[in-house]
Amino acid sequence: MTLGERFLEEPDLFPARQSGAPWGTERVVIHFAGNDYACDGLSASQAEGLRAKFGKLCSTAADGVRPTVVIRIFRVGPEDFVIDGREWEFDFDLDYTATAVTFAGFHFMGRLDFGPPLCAALWTPEDERLVSHAIFENVLRVVAAYHLLEQGGVLLHSAAVVSDAGAHVFFGPSGAGKSTISRLSLDAGCAVLSDDMNALRVTAGGVVVEKLPFAGDLGQTMETADGIYAVRNLCRLEMGSPAALRDVRAAPAIALLLECAPFVNRNPYKHDELIEKLEALNSRMPVRVLTFAMDNRFLRLLRTQEPG
Amino acid sequence: MIESATSFRKRADVRYRKVGGEGVVVKQAAGEVLVLSEVGARVLDLLEAGAGVDGLLRTLAGEYDIDQATLERDVLVHLQELFDAEVIEIAPAPAAFADTPASPA
C-alpha cells in the first residue's frame, strides 16, 4: 500500500524535499521538554491558533540555548487531497526510510528529515483548522518522539503523577487506566504532569520525566503541573483488585515499553536504537506491573515497595 | 503440519532483538510486540543464520541435554508457534537447476 493513498489524490507526488509556498511569515516557537520547536511560515490565524493552544509555552524566537527543530508550514491546494464526503479523520499513515519519516492524513502531508539537524515540513490546505483540527499537534507528536529518541529519551504513552518524593510514571495503551489513575492521584493530593504522553530521559542522576503538551481526557479540562522530576516508579498499568506490584523480566519489560513508544516503535530503521534506549531505561528504573482498583491504595503500595 | 524437511525464514516485517537471553519481536506491519522464551529466541537466531529444521535439531542437540525425540517435538512446537504468530514463513525451495544463460543471438 502506498503512503497516503487513503488521503492523497496522487500519493506518488508526495514531496521529496522540504519546499513549497509558506502560508505566511509568522513564526511561533513552542518550548517543552528542554527543546524549542520553531514553526515557520504560519499565517496570522495559524499563529494565533498555536498561541491559544500552547499558551505560555510559546514565544516568537528560539532562545538559542535549547536544541531547536524547525517545522515549516506550506500551503497546498485542497485538490491534492481526497474529497469523498468522509467525516474528519484524526488517524494518519506513516512511512519510513533510513533518512526520513513521511506521514499523510486528512488534509495534510508531512515529512521529518533526520538531517542532522532534524527538521520537519507540513503541507496543508487548512488555515485555522491546522490547529483546531489537530493537524499540527499530530505532526508535533511525531516530531517530538523522534527528537527525544535522538536525545536519548523516549516519548512514552503514560500518565505522570508527582508527589513530594518524586514522580510515578504509569504507562499503558489507551484504556489501561492512565486518566483514571491520574484522577485518583489528584484526589489524593498529588499533581499530574500529562495523563497521556510524557518525556522520559536517563540522566547521570537517574531517570527523569517531563510533561509533553499532549493531554488525554484529564488534561483537556485542567491545569497540569510543570517541571522535571526524578522518577521513583515506572509501572505498566493493569486495572484489577487487589492492588499489587510485580516485577517483570527484562524482555517482557522492553516489550511493554515498546508498545507504548508511539510513532517510533514501528520504524524498522529505529528499532535497535529504540530498544537500546528502552534497555537503558529499564536497567536504571525497572519496569513493574501495577494492578490498581478505584481507590488510592496503590499510592501506599508505591511508597512502601520502591524498586530494588 | 511442520516437517523436519521444511525451511523457514523470518518474515520481512519482523524485527527481533535479544534482551536478557529472551527475544523481543516486533511485527511492524501489525504493530504487535511478542516475547520469545530463551529456546524460542535461539530457534529464531538459528533460522536467521540460515539453518533448516534439520540443522536446527543438530545444533540444539549439542546445546541442550535432552533426548532426540523430545527435542524434535519441542522444536517443531516452537516453529509452529512462530509460524502461527506470523513471525516466520516457509522459505521458498532453492531452484532445482541453475538458470541457463541466454545464448547470444
Image: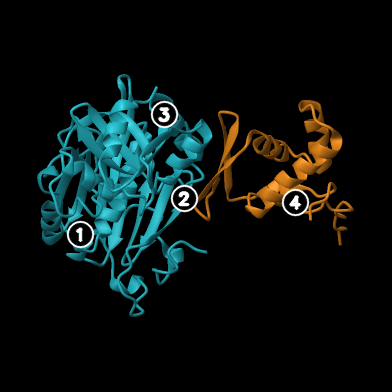
Chain colours: A cyan, B orange
| Residue A182 showing in the rendered view | yes
Q: Is label 2 on the same chain as label 4?
A: no
Disc 1 packing (10 Å; few <14; some 14–19; many ≥20): many
Q: Quadrant of residue A95?
A: bottom left
Q: Is label 3 on the same chain as label 2?
A: yes
Q: How many marks?
A: 4
Question: What whole-number distance in Å separates the C-alpha atoms at marks 3 and 2?
Answer: 30 Å
First along the sequence among labels 3 and 1:
1
CB within 8 Å, label 3 to label 1? no
Q: Which mark is residue A131?
A: 1
Q: Specify the subunit that label 1 lies on.
A: A
Q: Is residue A157 above or below residue A230?
A: below
Circle 4 SS class: loop
Q: Specify the subunit that label 2 lies on.
A: A
Q: Quadrant of residue A105?
A: bottom left
- Residue at 36% over, 79% down: A84
Q: Nearer the viewer, mark 3 or mark 2?
A: 3
Q: Is residue A59 above or below residue B18?
A: below
Question: What whole-number distance in Å separates the C-alpha atoms at marks 1 and 2?
Answer: 25 Å
